[in-house]
Image (spheres, rainbow, N blue to C red):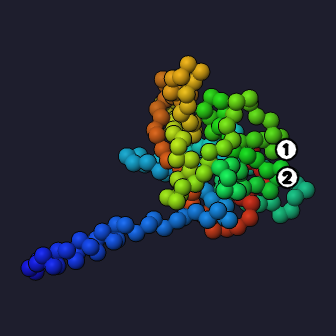
Amino acid sequence: MKFTITNTIGLLAAASSTLAAPLEARYDSAKPFTLDISFSNSPLSGPIQASGGSFWIGKNASTSCPSSVNPCPAGNSTSFTSPGNGLLYLNTEVPGGQQVYIRPDGLLTYTQAHSASTPAGSTFSGFEISPQNQLAKFYDFWLCSEDATDKAYRIWLEYRDDKGAITQNGKTGKNACTLVNLLANDVKKEGPAAWQYN
């Protein structure tokens, strides 16, 4: 096949219009969503799970439901809701809900059921979702193993300490951390994912 200038310009125009097409949004603010980790050069993938007051890759969601509730939500996965104002909640049925926040030491965590108690200096806002489905693009999320042999990885955030140094407490010298993004991905099944997360 012989290329002419006209053919080449036409191909370039078609390619540039394809590249300029917007990403298809995977997030609809009216629906619950998972948060999937995204980064290169690692086999770790998938949605983060709530367990023991932290968010993990490599652990199952930890949920419970009172015997008086029938039927209970499935409780085998972690999903979230957001009113679109930078606040983030676990997708639960428990009265009062469970809010996601950042502890002063940088741990991404959530309130316990029936309690709004949080440490002084915690951060609750900044969890906006970008048009590219990225959660809190101005925060740096780290996925950290607990020790050199652990197969579970916990989410921490980088922050500036009282001396002005940038740090994240997930790395202790005995483990490894990887910088990640969290991407919102719509859940097909509507309704709460769990009664409450433990």
Could you say where residue 98 lies in the image, as x and y percent from the top left?
76, 47
Give the quadrant of the N terminus.
bottom left
The amino acid marked with disc number 1 is His
Could you say where residue 23 lies in the image, as x and y percent from the top left?
45, 65
SS assignment at label 2: loop
Say left or right for 63 vs 158: right
Q: Is residue 65 visible?
A: no
Could you say where residue 80 lies in the image, as x and y percent from the top left?
67, 55
Residue at the image position 34 percent from the left and 71 percent from the top? 18
Q: Is residue 23 above or below residue 166?
A: below
Say left or right for 61 vs 94: left
Which is nearer the N-term, disc 1 or disc 2?
Answer: 2
Q: Are marks 1 and 2 in contact (CB under 8 Å)?
A: yes
Could you say where residue 127 lies in the image, as x and y percent from the top left?
62, 48
Q: Is residue 152 above or below residue 119?
A: below
Q: Is residue 57 visible?
A: yes
SS assignment at label 1: loop
Say left or right for 160 vs 179: right
The amino acid marked with disc number 2 is Pro
Q: Label 1 belongs to which residue? A: 114
Residue nearer the viewer, 47 or 21: 21
Residue at the image position 67 percent from the left and 37 percent from the top? 123
Q: Residue furthest top?
A: 163
Q: Label 2 belongs to which residue? A: 95
